[in-house]
C-alpha cells in the first residue's frame, strides 16, 4: 500500500507501478499530513500517516528525519537497503549489488560510496581488501 503522492513521485521519475499487489491509497487524516509537511515532503508525510491509519507492520522509508518521526509515531521502519538484504536472505535475489546499482542508475536512489561498501561488505558481496575497495571508487 502506498500513498498517492508516492505513486506520483515514482511516475514522475519514470517508475511505473504495474504490479497488481501495489495499492495506491491517500491517507484520510489530511490535517496530520499537513502537520508533518512542516518537516517532511509530501510522500514521507502521507506514508507516515497512512501507515499509522492502517496500523502497518512496517513502513518503508529511507530519509533519516522521516524515519525518526515515524519511529516517534510508534511505527516500525526499514529502508530499501533493509528490503534488499531481506530479499537476498529469502532467496528472491542472488545478490544485492546489481539491484542497488540499477536503483542508483535508473531510479534516482542515492547512497554514499562508504555506506554502499559497508553494506555490501556486511552482505558478503565484497571483501574488505584495499584492492577491491579501490576498484569500487
Image (cartoon, rainbow, N blue to C red):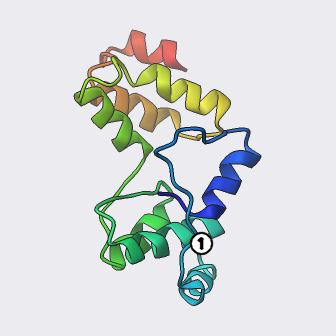
Mark count: 1
Q: Residue at x 41, y 77 (%)?
A: 53
Q: Nearer the viewer, residue 106 or 134?
A: 106
Q: Residue at x 54, y 25 (%)?
A: 101
Q: Dot 1, crowdedness within 10 Å: few (<14), some or many (≥20)?
A: some
- In this picture, residue 60 sits left or right of residue 9: left
Q: Nearer the viewer, residue 38 or 49?
A: 49
**Quadrant of the rendered structure where residue 56 is?**
bottom left
Q: State whether residue 21 is above or below residue 99.
A: below
- Report the residue that reaches farthest toward the left: 89
- In this picture, residue 87 sits left or right of residue 136: left
Q: Residue at x 30, y 16 (%)?
A: 127
- Report the residue that reaches farthest toward the front: 20
User: Which quadrant is the C terminus positioned in?
Assistant: top right
For disc 1, the marked residue is: 40
Q: Position of residue 70 (x, y in %)?
A: 40, 71
Q: Secondary structure at mark 1?
A: loop
Q: Residue at x 56, y 58 (%)?
A: 24
Q: State whether residue 69 is above or below residue 30.
A: above
Q: Position of residue 119 (x, y in %)?
A: 35, 33
Q: Position of residue 117 (x, y in %)?
A: 41, 28
Q: State whether residue 34 is above or below residue 23.
A: below
Q: Position of residue 45 (x, y in %)?
A: 56, 72
Amino acid at each position: 500500500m502506498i500513498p498517492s503522492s508516492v505513486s506520483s513521485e515514482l511516475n514522475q521519475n519514470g517508475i511505473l507501478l504495474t504490479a497488481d499487489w501495489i495499492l495506491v491509497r491517500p491517507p484520510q487524516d489530511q490535517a496530520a499530513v499537513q502537520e508533518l509537511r512542516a518537516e517532511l515532503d509530501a510522500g514521507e508525510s502521507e506514508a507516515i500517516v497512512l501507515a499509522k491509519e492502517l496500523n502497518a507492520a512496517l513502513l518503508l522509508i529511507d530519509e533519516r528525519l522521516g524515519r525518526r518521526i515515524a519511529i516517534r509515531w510508534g511505527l516500525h521502519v526499514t529502508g530499501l537497503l533493509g528490503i534488499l538484504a531481506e530479499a537476498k536472505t529469502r532467496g528472491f535475489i542472488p545478490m544485492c549489488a546489481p539491484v542497488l546499482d540499477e536503483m542508483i542508475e535508473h531510479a534516482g536512489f542515492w547512497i554514499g560510496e562508504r555506506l554502499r561498501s559497508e553494506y555490501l561488505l556486511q552482505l558478503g558481496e565484497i571483501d574488505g581488501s584495499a584492492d577491491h575497495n579501490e576498484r569500487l571508487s
